[in-house]
Each structure stands twice: as C-alpha cells, then as structure tokens.
Image: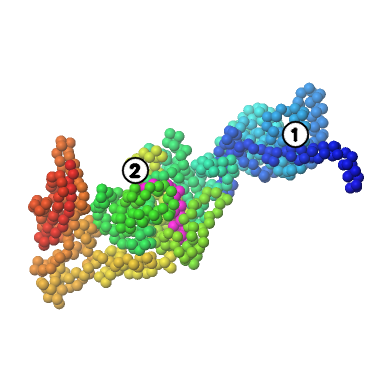
Amino acid sequence: MRKRLEHYIKHNKIKFIGFVVLLIAYYFCLPKQLFKDPTATVITSSNHQLLGAKIADDGQWRFPPKDSIPEKFRTCITLFEDEYFYKHPGFNPISIFKAFRDNISSGKVKRGGSTLTQQVIRLSRKGKSRTYWEKFKELILATRLEFRASKDEILAHYCNNAPFGGNVVGLEAASWRYFNRTPYDLSWAESATLAVLPNAPSLIYPGKNQNQLLTKRNRLLKKLLQKHIIDSLTYKLAIAENLPQTPYPLPEIAPHLLQKIAKTHSGEHIKTTLDIDLQTRVNAIVKEHYKQLQQNQINNIAVLVLDVKTRQVLSYVGNSPTTKKHQKDVDIIDKPRSTGSILKPFLYTAMLDSGEILPHTLIADIPTQYGNYSPKNFDKAYDGAVAASKALSRSLNVPSVRMLKNYGLERFFQQLKQLHLKDLSQNANHYGLSLILGGAESNLWDLCKNYAALSSTLNHFSETSSEYFSNEFCEPTFLASKSIDFGKKTKEKTLFDAASIYLTYESLKNVNRPEGDENWEFFDDSKQIAWKTGTSFGYRDAWAIGTTKDYVVGVWVGNADGEGRPGLIGIHAAAPILFNVFDLLPKSEWFTKPFDEMQEVNICSLSGYRASQNCNQTQPMYIQLAGLKTKPCPYHIMAHLDISESFQVNSSCESVENIIHKPWFVLPPLMAYYYKTKNPFYKPLPKYRTDCFGNTMTSIQFIYPNQDKNIFLPKDFDGTTNELILQIAHSEPETTVFWYIDQEFVGVTKDIHELAIKPMPGEHTITVIDVFGNESKQHIEILK
C-alpha cells in the first residue's frame, strides 16, 4: 500500500501538490476568531442575577458570549431552523436541493436551505451579498467549523450573535430586553418567540407585525406538541401567552458600580460580590431619604457596605436617584470630600496605642488658641475637662485639636499615610491642626476600608493565637473572582494594637444615636455598633460610618457640587440612613475583648488616669498594655484642712494633731472655671484660713486672651472702635483682683473677673494680681 502511494505521488506530483495546497487552504480558511464585535459590559450579583449592563461601543445590545444554552431554547431553535443539526456535517444536502428547486420554480428566493452552522458562518461574514457563490463559500466554511468546534459550541455561537430585531443581538440580550429575565427562566412560549425572531428580524419585531410573529410562534409550538416535546395542556397555555410589545429597559440596580467596572473590564461579563437583595433594599432606603433631603436642596447620597471578614463589597450605591442637573451620574464613593470629624477615631486609637492616654483620661476643653487657629466645639460651649472617650463619642473639637497637638501633627499624618488615604496629597503643615476637624479630604471607599481593617484586626487577633496579619489594611473588592490575601501571621501589630482598637470601639459604641433611636441600649436585641459621624465646615458634607464584627456601613450625604446647606449634619442627615441599612443586616456579636494585650489596673474614677495614692475613688479597668507607662493621676492632691474641713491650714496656723489630711480633686483654674458649670458636684479646694501663711498655689489663669497673640479691635458701622474684653479664671472667684496694663493700674474685679479696655495699637503686657499676691501675665499686640 505504501509503495503504491509512493508510486502515485511520483507520477502525479502536480496533483498531489495541488491537493496538499487545497488541504492547507481548507485548514486555514476559517478565521481563528469568528466574531470580533464589541460587546456590552455586563455585571451580575454574587448569585448571578443581572445588576446592569452598558451598551456595546457600536450601539448594539450584545452581551458577552456564553457557552451554555437553555434547554428550551435549544429545542425550539433546532426544531425551527435546523431539525437535523446534530446529525449533518455542517450542511444538509436535502434541504439545499429543496430550496434550490423551489427557488428556481418560483423565480425568486422563496426558502433557504442553510443549516445553523451555515448561518453562524454568514453572521460572521457581515455584509456579504447572498449569492450562490457566497452560499458555496459558506458551505465550505461550515464544514470546516464542524471539524473545529462541537455542535454545542456552534449553537452557542449562533445564540450569542443572532439578530433579534432593532439593536438587540444575541439570546441573553433579547431575553432581558423582551421578557425582562434570564433566558433560563423563559417559558416555552417565550423561548419559541425568540427562536423565530432571527429568521426575519427586520420584518418581525416585538410590538410590530404581531400577526406574523404570532403565526410563526404558534406554528413552532404546534410542532413541539406533535413531536411530544410538550403536552397538550402546556401547548394550550403557551399559545394563550401574549407577545412582548416594547423592549424593557435593562436593570439599573448598581449603575455606578457598572460605570467603575466598565473602565477596566469593558465588554466583559463580570460577576460581582454584591448581594442583590441587599443592594435593592439599600437603593430603596436611599431613594426614600433622598425624597426628604431634596426638600432642603440636599441632592446626593452615597452608601457602601463591606463584609469585614471577606472584605467584599455587598452594596454599592454611588449616588441618589437625583436629576442630571444635580449630577446623578457622578459616583461619589471614590470622590474626595472634606472629612469633618470622621478621622477622630484614628487619632484616639493612635494615642491609646502609643500610651499617650487611657480611655477616660481627662482632656482640657477650654478656649484654645494656636497661632491664628482657634478651634470651637459645635455647640460653642466648653466642658473644662472631659474624658477622652467622651470627647470622641461626643465629637468635641477642642479636645481633639489639643490631643493632636500633644500627639504631634507630623506623627499622626504619617500614620494616616499608612492607611493609604489617597486624597491626602499635601504635607502635614498644609493641613495644620485642622486636619482632625475636616481640614483634609478623603473618600467613602478609603474610609470604609480602614474601618473594616480595624475591625478585621480585632477579629483575626481573637481567632488566632493573638496574632496579626501583615496585609490587614488591604483594598476591598467588588469582583467575585478576586479573593483577599491578608498576608502572613505575625506577632507584630500592623499599625494599631488590638486593645487600642477595642477600646476605641467601646467609646464609639456609646455615640448618641439619631432622633427616634435614642433608647437603643434598653432593647436586648438591639445591634451594638461602633459608629462615628462627621460634618464638614460650611455644612457641605455629612458622614456616618459604623462597624460591627461582620459589617462596615459608610454613608455620605451632601451636594456633589459642594454647596452647603443648613441641617446638613452627620447626626441628622447621614446617621438615619446608616441605621436603616444596619437594620437590613444580620445581628452581629460584639467584638471579643483582646485580654492578651490588656491588663487590669486601678483607675482614678474622676480623672481617668492610673490611680495615685491620693485618689480616693478608684475602679478596676482593663487598659491597653501601652497605657501602663502613662503617669498617675495629676489632679489629686493631699489637702491639709482644719477640723471643720472648711479651710486649708498648715503648721503656721494650726497644731499638727488638729490638721485633717484629705485627698482632693483639683483642676487648673481655667479648666475648673468651665468644669464646675457642667459638674455641680465639683468642689473647689477650700481657701487658706486667713491666719495661715505659705499659700503659694497658682490660682489665676487667663481665659481671654489665653495666649500671646495679635488682636484686631473691630469697629462699629459709625467707625467707633470696640473695647477689648479681658477675662480670667480664679480658683477663688470672690477674691479681689487688680488689673494693670503695662504696669499702669486700670481696674479691679471681684466675683466676675472681666474688664473692658481700649488699648492703643502696639505691644502691651496685661498683669493681674490678687490680694494674696498671686500674679499672672499675658502679652498681646493690638493691630490697626
């Protein structure tokens, strides 16, 4: 046999070469990629439900190709278009002969003999004239396709690229456009409708040519009945179904996430991590609050929900359903906005972590001036002294600025950079101390990811042998195909230790909830949430971010164009949305206390410091290990009193055996001045008995001006220069105080220590002296 073949080739070289050339040409005649048309960007939820789609670049609703085919449609299309599809080699000689005969006899193209394989080839060769020569080429290419692909692959090509009328291409797009659901959920009548549409898409279109479409569909359903594929009852119900009239709009459940994904995955079918039920319900919450807020001309809302353990995005609402005028298409989640107070928990955690404070350490809340910067609390009032945890939960501005000053601006700024807040684009000095009050910008995505990182740090510490993960502060994901790598286990903290985070959350858990939800703590089934609000200067941004062991919810409310509005406050505008969203989420257990990084010590009940020997009211408390290096309580002294405890005495005026030694809580005068207005049980240290000597306690402190500073004296409309009001705090207000300007006596006060003066422009020294000889000075410069 071999010799005969060699003999044939030797004597028929030209024929053999021609055969080989034809064989090679046949092998390469079919393009490697049949279809290169642009496709729509399609996103689905974590359970494969359609969230939205962006039309293809050529204006066609053409979904990315799929390999699988719904069984009902497979049956309908093969029965209608190519009954012997699974048997022929790419063409059907009998069908071709019948079509040729009928067309010749009628003198026009009356019927086609193309198989589904040939139709796939024709679809791939767009714009080719339908001549017999083109038909022959399609036949050759069809046989080649049969060699290269399986029958199911060929059918998938058809389903993905067949025209279904208008700008709808492919089965999946047609199913959503005409029936508003996936092709796998179609009935027999709906599948039959779509099966007959590609046969003449320019003539038969839902909403038009209803009689032709109905006739074709019912003829196919009748054939299904005759083939015993469906029973008579199914057939009767199927023919009773109405035809689609006009195309449905595609779902727009997560339009802003679709925008974001389309930038990097254009034309792809992307499965996201979104929970479609949660996303739909969050959309409804946002819509409801938008209706209320827009009455105050507040038009934009963004909400982000993260799963702490997987770091997956569960809900992504980039904006409210507002108008185009109010920039409804802008995705707010990744846009920089003024942070307000939302960074305060990071400072509190940092100071705990470094051992600068304990949870309830008293922080001064008094009039404060740093250069030209004078922070004010939201209510314009002062507490004198407030526990650090209360300063955080009440979001007091003055204590926060003083904490930042003590901790170090540059030091804190560098830690914020470690959180990868990408909108911190300037250096620390550019922001100054206002950094902690909204002087910087960040975005909802970065803030939520870091709250999630803190929560995850606590979770991992409790779940492992008190270990951390090296990549805890990682980027969340909305792509189901991506899993988060938290890095390697380590004994070293990533940024903040677990104890400091836990103590911060304990404080944030006690933040006052919005109106109507104040009594949450009295309900056993209420959710324990660590949360924080923020309001930017000028009422431009309202924030609320909360976390449980399992979830982080972030909310931003405002106007995309930056317009401020009265009432645009975190607690009123953003917090209600936050708690509405948390109500949709499963209840979480509270975080486990990280005992391995804590130690129980006695704490002074009044000052929040580690108890000194002079503290007479103490309580045991678990503090972070770094807190062991904090100093003992500085506000308790041992007072030496007379037998009635009404006066301080010493050995110069009282016998030693009659002196009572008693611990006393004493704040500096300026702190005490404000503290006693909010704490009626605060008892000032008794004054010295008049017959005693040796009282050297400093008891005077300036309220205004409270630092060396430049002062402008404002003028009235008539040009009159206003007076400068001087004010001091004295530990014994009833004491007489004498006032001097540049060593010149100007006045005397008692009980209320305020004095109005009108100094000339220039530098001045203000001196106050009480009747005991205690003195305090302040330098100022009056500017023109």
Asked if 716 appears above or below 454 in the picture, the reply is above
Asked if 259 appears above or below 647 in the picture, the reply is above
Q: Quadrant of residue 130?
A: top right
Of the numbered discs in the image, which one, if any, rests on residue 451? none
Front disc: 1 or 2: 1
Residue type highlighted by circle 1: Glu
Q: Residue at x 82, y 27 (%)?
A: 101
Q: Quadrant of residue 202?
A: top right
Q: Is 487 situated left or right of 758 in this image?
A: right
Of the numbered discs in the image, which one, if any, rests on residue 138? 1
Asked if 614 appears above or below 550 in the picture, the reply is below
Residue at numbered disc 2: 539
Range of residues picked out in magenta: 438-459
Q: How is the image coloured?
A: rainbow
Q: Is 368 situated left or right of 718 in this image?
A: right
* Dot 1 or dot 2, earlier in sequence: 1
Asked if 643 appears above or below 23 in the picture, the reply is below
Q: Is 686 situated left or right of 243 in this image?
A: left
Q: Quadrant of residue 688?
A: bottom left
Q: Residue at x 69, y 33 (%)?
A: 125
Any magenta on residue 404? no
- Residue 345 seen in the current view: no
Q: x%, y% of residue 187?
A: 66, 40
Residue type highlighted by circle 2: Tyr
Any magenta on residue 456? yes
